C-alpha cells in the first residue's frame, strides 16, 4: 500500500457482521471474557488499536502506542529509561518537554541540551551512561533541521537509542525509522488531528523489543490513554492527512517566498527556502517542507503585535497543524529565549485560499 491508501484503509479495522463501512466508536470500558478478546479499555480498545495500526503503517514501524497528549507520549519514553540515565536533547527542544525533563525528571535523568545541527557537539556530549538521543526536526520556532541518518549512525556506534519528535513534519513528509531512528513521537494535537480540536500523542517503534514492552507498561499502568472518541476522530483525520499536508506546504512555500521579498521583513525561517541553513538536509530527508514558518519583521515586538492584530484570517493563538492559519509572537508563549528575537513571529499556515492569505498579509504589513 502507498501512503494515501494506508491513510484511508490502515485505521479502519471492522469485525462487525452488519458490515458498517466505517468502524464504530467502541465506548465500552470493559469486554466480555473470551479467548483473544480485549479485556479493559485502559489496556486496549478497538479505536485506539486502529489509530496505532494506521500510524505504525504510515511510519513504517513495527507497532505504535497512543497516549492522551504528545507530552504523555514523550513522558512514557523518559519513564521507561533506567535510573541514572543520561540523555542528549536539542537545545531548542519543544519547551513543554524541556520543562518536563528539567522539573519532573530532575532526580532521575541527566540531560545535555545540544545543538543537534552540529553532530560533533553531539559526539562530545556522549557519556558512558547515555541511553537516549532525542531529536526534534524540524525544530521550533527556527525550523532548524537535524540530520536524522547521521545522528542515528553516531548513536548506534555508541549503543544509544534514538527517538525523533517528528510533529512538525508529520508522517507524510518524514519517516525517521527509515532513516535509522528507533522511536518516533508525534503530538497528535497538531497535523495528525489537523482540526485544532483534539489533544493526543503517539509513539511508533522500529521493533518490538524489551524497551518497547517497558513503554507498553507505562501506557497500560500509567494510564495516560486517549478516549475512544479522540482515537476515532484521529483515524478520521488521518484519511485526509496526505492531502492536507500538501496544501499546508504549498501555501507555506508561497507565503515564505512572499515574506522573503518584502521590504518590512528582516528574515524568514522556512526549510524550503534555498538560503535556509537546513535546506540541503531537509531536501534529502523530507518529502516536503511542511506548513510551519517563522519570520522577523523590521521593528519592535510591539510592531509585531500590531501587525498580528491587523490580520483577519490568521488567529493570534499558539499551537499548529490545524486547517486554519494561526500566528503568534513566539516569545509571548515560551518567554524570552536566547537566540530567538523578541519580535519573531511564528505562523502555522492553514489550507485557506492562498490569494486570501497573501492579501491579508499585504494589508497587515502596509504601513510598516
Ligand atoms: C505540541 C508539541 C508537543 C507536545 O504535544 P501536546 O499534544 O501538546 O502534549 C511536543 N512536541 C512538539 C514539536 C509539539 O509541537
Image (cartoon, grey):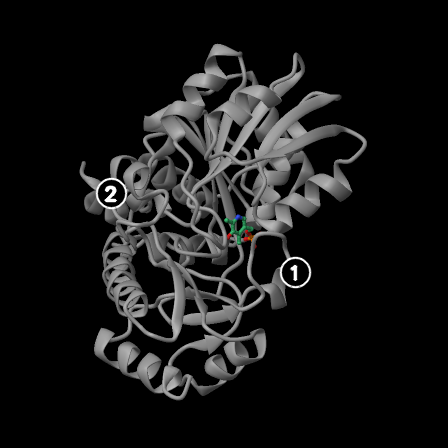
Q: Which of 215 and 145 is in front in this view?
A: 145
Between the C-alphas of marks 2 and 1, the distance is 33 Å
Q: Which of 24 and 125 is in front in this view?
A: 125
Residue at the disc numbered 1: 336
| Neighbour tally class for label 1: few under 14, some 14-19, many 20 plus, Cα within 10 Å | few
Q: Name which quarter of the figure residue 250 lies in.
A: bottom left
Residue 270 in percent (x, y) is at: 35, 55
Q: Which of marks 2 and 1 is nearer the N terminus?
A: 2
Residue 339 in percent (x, y) is at: 57, 52
Work out which quarter of the rendered image holds the C terminus and state it: bottom left
Horizontally, residue 70 falls left or right of residue 194, namely right
Q: Which mark is residue 287?
A: 2
Horizontally, residue 331 falls left or right of residue 297, namely right
Q: Residue farthest to the right? A: 107
Q: Nearer the viewer, residue 297 or 37?
A: 297
Residue 224 visible, this angle: no
Q: Which residue is drawn at 42% across and 45% down?
A: 138
Horizontally, residue 271 falls left or right of residue 63, namely left
Q: Which residue is drawn at 69% across and 44% down?
A: 100
Residue 33 in percent (x, y) is at: 55, 34
Amino acid at each position: 500500500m502507498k501512503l494515501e491508501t494506508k491513510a484511508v484503509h490502515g485505521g479502519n479495522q471492522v469485525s462487525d457482521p452488519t458490515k458498517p463501512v466505517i468502524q464504530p466508536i467502541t465506548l465500552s470500558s470493559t469486554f466480555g471474557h473470551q479467548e483473544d478478546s480485549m479485556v479493559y479499555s485502559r489496556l486496549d480498545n478497538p479505536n485506539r488499536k486502529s489509530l496505532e495500526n494506521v500510524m505504525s503503517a504510515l511510519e513504517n514501524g513495527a507497532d505504535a502506542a497512543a497516549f492522551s497528549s504528545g507530552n504523555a507520549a514523550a513522558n512514557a519514553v523518559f519513564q521507561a529509561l533506567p535510573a541514572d540515565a543520561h540523555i542528549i536533547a536539542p537545545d531548542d527542544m519543544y519547551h513543554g518537554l524541556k520543562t518536563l525533563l528539567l522539573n519532573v525528571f530532575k532526580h532521575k535523568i541527566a540531560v545535555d541540551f545540544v545543538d543537534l545541527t552540529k553532530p560533533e557537539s553531539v559526539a562530545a556530549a556522549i557519556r558512558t551512561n547515555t541511553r537516549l538521543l532525542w531529536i526534534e526536526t524540524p525544530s521550533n520556532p527556527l525550523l532548524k533541521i537535524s540530520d536524522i541518518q547521521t545522528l542515528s549512525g553516531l548513536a548506534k556506534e555508541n549503543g544509544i537509542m534514538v527517538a525523533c519528535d517528528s510533529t512538525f513534519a508529520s508522517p507524510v513528509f518524514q519517516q525517521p525509522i527509515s532513516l535509522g531512528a528507533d522511536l518516533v513521537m508525534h503530538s497528535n494535537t497538531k497535523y495528525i488531528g489537523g482540526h485544532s480540536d483534539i489533544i493526543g500523542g503517539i509513539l511508533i517503534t522500529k521493533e518490538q523489543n524489551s524497551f518497547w514492552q517497558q513503554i507498553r507498561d507505562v501506557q497500560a499502568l500509567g494510564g495516560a490513554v486517549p478516549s475512544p472518541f479522540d482515537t476515532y476522530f484521529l483515524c478520521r483525520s488521518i484519511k485526509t492527512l496526505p492531502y492536507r499536508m500538501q496544501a499546508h506546504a504549498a501555501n507555506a512555500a508561497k507565503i515564505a517566498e512572499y515574506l522573503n521579498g518584502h521590504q518590512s521583513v528582516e528574515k524568514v525561517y522556512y526549510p524550503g527556502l534555498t538560503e535556509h541553513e537546513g535546506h540541503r538536509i531537509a531536501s534529502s530527508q523530507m518529502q516536503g517542507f511542511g506548513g510551519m514558518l517563522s519570520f522577523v519583521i523590521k521593528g519592535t515586538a510591539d510592531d509585531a503585535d500590531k501587525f498580528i492584530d491587523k490580520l483577519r484570517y490568521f488567529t493570534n493563538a499558539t499551537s499548529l497543524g490545524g486547517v486554519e492559519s494561526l500566528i503568534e509572537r513566539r516569545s509571548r508563549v515560551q518567554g524570552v529565549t536566547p537566540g530567538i528575537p523578541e519580535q519573531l513571529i511564528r505562523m502555522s499556515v492553514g489550507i485557506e485560499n492562498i490569494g486570501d492569505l497573501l492579501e491579508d498579509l499585504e494589508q497587515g504589513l502596509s504601513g510598516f
